[in-house]
Image: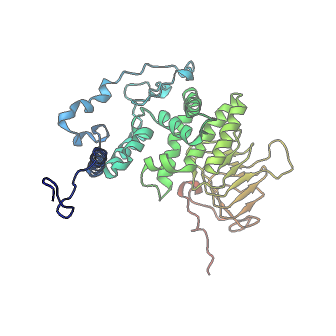
Amino acid sequence: MIKGSHSSDNHINTAVPRSTLHECKLLFLLLFSMTASTLSPPAITDALRPPNSRNPSRSIVACIDSSRPKIPTTNPVSYNSSTVQIVDSLCHWPELADQVSDDYVDDVWSQIREEALSDTEDEPILARYYSELILRHESLESALSNLLSMKLSIPNLLSNNDLRELFAESLVHDDAIGRAVRADLRAAFDRDPASSKMVHYFLYYKGFHACQAHRVAHWLWITGRRAAALLIQSRSSEAFAVDIHPRARIGSGIFLGHATGVVIGETAVVGDNVSILHNVTLGGTGKDSGDRHPKICDGVLVGPGTQILGNVKIWEGAKVGAGSVVLKDVPPMTTAVGSPARLLGGKENPIVLDQFGGLNTDHTSWSDFVI
């Protein structure tokens, strides 16, 4: 054997190419970073915590509200919608006519914000969602404009920002819309047993969204901007499955339960504190022109699947049972059921209700039918 040589049986080459070592190092760093990010708990910022749960060492976060610039008082009549500034950190909003006093407190908006903070404590995954839709907004009007624009915009065709300014313009110019929005939220909270928090109704109930989109469309219609009004109607019908003509007049304290399939025609009128369930039609007869749709007075309950056709009147406090077809007027504080609808107790001596049907949303206690 030649000196210095080694047999193949007792020699193993352990050299590893440099490229392989480099690849192994990169793989190790990648796995380490993925493990660290997976094990790290989600960050919950102090800005989303109630004041008594915030980190004292980061007290600057607790003072964020006081450090924000004050919003100047703005006359809603002369306000230019193009000046609405909605930024990532804070949505600036002009002070409305009924909100300029120092002692004004918006109870509805305060409750929504408190409930949002509570939800983010229970479910930290909701922190970013609630921050974008609730917590970074100074007013209910600002949050509503943002929410509706996100739901009704069309990517690359109808921008979120343009719709947001359109909604903001109507809410600033007509503060009656804001009052009606708050009445609708209170109505749902009082009448819907499935609604435990007002923030849930604001965020998730499409009947509420469709009603507020209609309020904006109606304002556009009566101010002569009918093309924009019809656009909002069309998008609302597609997004919420609720079709309300922008000319139709709707009061405040409206509860649209489930709402799917609700159709309200052009000349229909809906009063205050009315409850309407899903698959309800307030329609014309199909042949008349002019004033041809139903008039629903204050405090009426319209049950699911009801069809009310023609220029008929449902008087104050009346109930219309589920699946009814109404072709004639219904007297106040009575109950109409069936197809075609008839009054309980008969036309000559109908049973009289002791409270408005639209306020208690009781659909079944009137029935004495036994299976």
Can you name the residue that lies furthest to the right here?
Answer: 287
Name the image quarter holding the N terminus.
bottom left
Q: How many labels, in total? A: 0
Whether residue 362 sits left or right of residue 199 in the image: it is right
Nearer-the-camera pick, 16 or 27: 16
**Up/down of 66 relative to 218, above or below:** above
The front one of 47 and 209 is 47
| Residue at point 50%, 34% (across, down) | 141
Colour mapping used in the image: rainbow
- Whether residue 109 is visible, yes or no, is no
Residue sitting nearer the eye, 42 or 103: 42
**On-image quarter of the C terminus:** bottom right
- Toward the viewer: 78 or 44? 44
Q: Position of residue 213 (x, y in %)?
A: 60, 40
- The residue sitting at the left extreme is 3
Residue 45 figure quarter: top left
Q: Residue at x 18, y 61 (%)?
A: 7
Residue 368 is situated, as x and y percent measured from the top left of the image, at: 61, 75
Q: Point out the residue furthest to the bottom here.
A: 371
Provide residue 215's location: percent of width, then percent of height: 61, 38
Q: Position of residue 110 (x, y in %)?
A: 38, 39
Instruction: Tell me what residue is drawn at x 38 percent, y 45 percent.
Output: 116
Q: Is residue 270 visible?
A: yes
- Compared across the picture, whether 112 is left or right of 185 comes to left
